[in-house]
Image (tube, grey):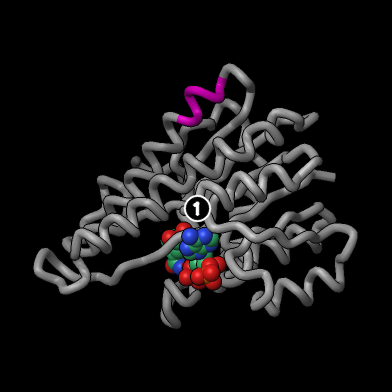
Amino acid sequence: MATILITGANRGIGLAITTLALTRGNKVIAGCRSPASAAQLSVLQKNYFEHCSIIELDVVDEQSLERASSSLSEPLDLLVCNAGIGNGYGGMHGEENTMAVFEKVLLTNTASPFFTTRAFLPHLRKSSGLAKVAVISSLMGSQAHTAANAYAYRASKAGANNIAVTLSRELARENIAVATYHPGWVRTDMGGPNGDISPDESAAKLFERFDELTMKQSGQFINYNGDKLQL
Ligand SMILES: NC(=O)c1ccc[n+]([C@@H]2O[C@H](COP(=O)([O-])OP(=O)(O)OC[C@H]3O[C@@H](n4cnc5c(N)ncnc54)[C@H](OP(=O)(O)O)[C@@H]3O)[C@@H](O)[C@H]2O)c1
């Protein structure tokens, strides 16, 4: 039975991945900033108690990452770096494009997959199979995407893709696979109500992708439907 850690597991795509992993019989470590207010995770934990643990985890807080990693004793087979934030769709003069916002978005979306992977690497190394890291990125971070807005978000996801590629190279010698994924346009707080797919549909497709990930695909940017995307 594979053990999976998911960041931002309390709502949206992270909650759907967590729920699906538990129904598949995986052991899940659900990371979230505020376990006390994660009502849906608490229900899952009651229903799957021996398979589901909730850990406090803020992906932009190094001490939080360190505490969370130290609290684990088991091997990790899959780490899903899902936690992320948006910052609107303004153009160059959009009010949201302040330096403070750039700092927050880049730290959360670009740097946190690096810090999260580094924090949990000792547990990934203990996997008896092929350990995998899945970075949940966005098509908006592809250089092929033609949008002329959302500067910080697009840059942050392009950066996340770049981090994933570099991680895939450094971790290749340890036989740990790293890939970056577009989850689709998903109906969540971030994606809004008009998205193409539900969180459950996204999670189901993402799991197909995680399951088929091999070292050969490590370093790739992959769409939820399996298509290879341009970084
Ligand atoms: N929805 C889409 O259409 C779409 C499309 C492309 C890519 N994505 C990506 O998919 C991922 C999940 O998005 P979503 O739509 O599920 O968004 P969401 O509904 O807004 O959920 C975001 C999750 O990330 C968590 N989070 C944010 N900052 C965090 C931090 N510092 N530490 C720990 N957790 C943090 C949130 O926790 P709190 O509840 O504590 O805030 C929440 O659990 C993101 O990386 C997003 O960029 C989404």
Is residue 118 shown left or right of residue 52? Answer: left
Tell me if residue 41 comes above or below residue 170 in the rendering.
below
The x and y percentages for residue 182 are 46, 54
Please identify the quadrant where the C terminus is shown: top left
Residue at 65% across, 40% down: 212
Q: Is mark 1 within 8 Å of ligand 1?
A: yes
Q: Specify the quadrant of the image occupied by residue 102.
A: bottom left
Along the line of sight, which residue is nearer the eye, 54 or 6? 54
Give the percent coordinates (x, y) of residue 137: 44, 52
Residue depicted at x 11% and y 64%: 92
- The residue indicated by pointer 1 is 61
How crowded is the residue under tag 1: few (<14 C-alpha within 10 Å), some, or many (20+)? few
Residue name at image x 63 percent, y 23 percent? 175
Image spot of residue 172 (x, y percent): 56, 22
Q: Secondary structure at mark 1?
A: loop
Quarter placement of the N terminus: top right
* Residue 221, above or below 125: below
Q: Return the residue found at the far right.
A: 50
Q: Is residue 1 above or below residue 171?
A: below
Side of 88 where 61 appears, left or right: right
Residue 170 part of the magenta segment: yes
Secondary structure mainly formed by the magenta segment: helix
- Which amino acid type is marked by label 1? Asp
Q: Nearer the viewer, residue 81 or 138?
A: 81
Vertical placement of 231 versus 214: above or below? below
Can see residue 215? yes
Asked whether the viewer can see residue 185, the reply is: no
Q: Which residues are magenta?
A: 167-172
Does residue 129 belong to the magenta stretch?
no
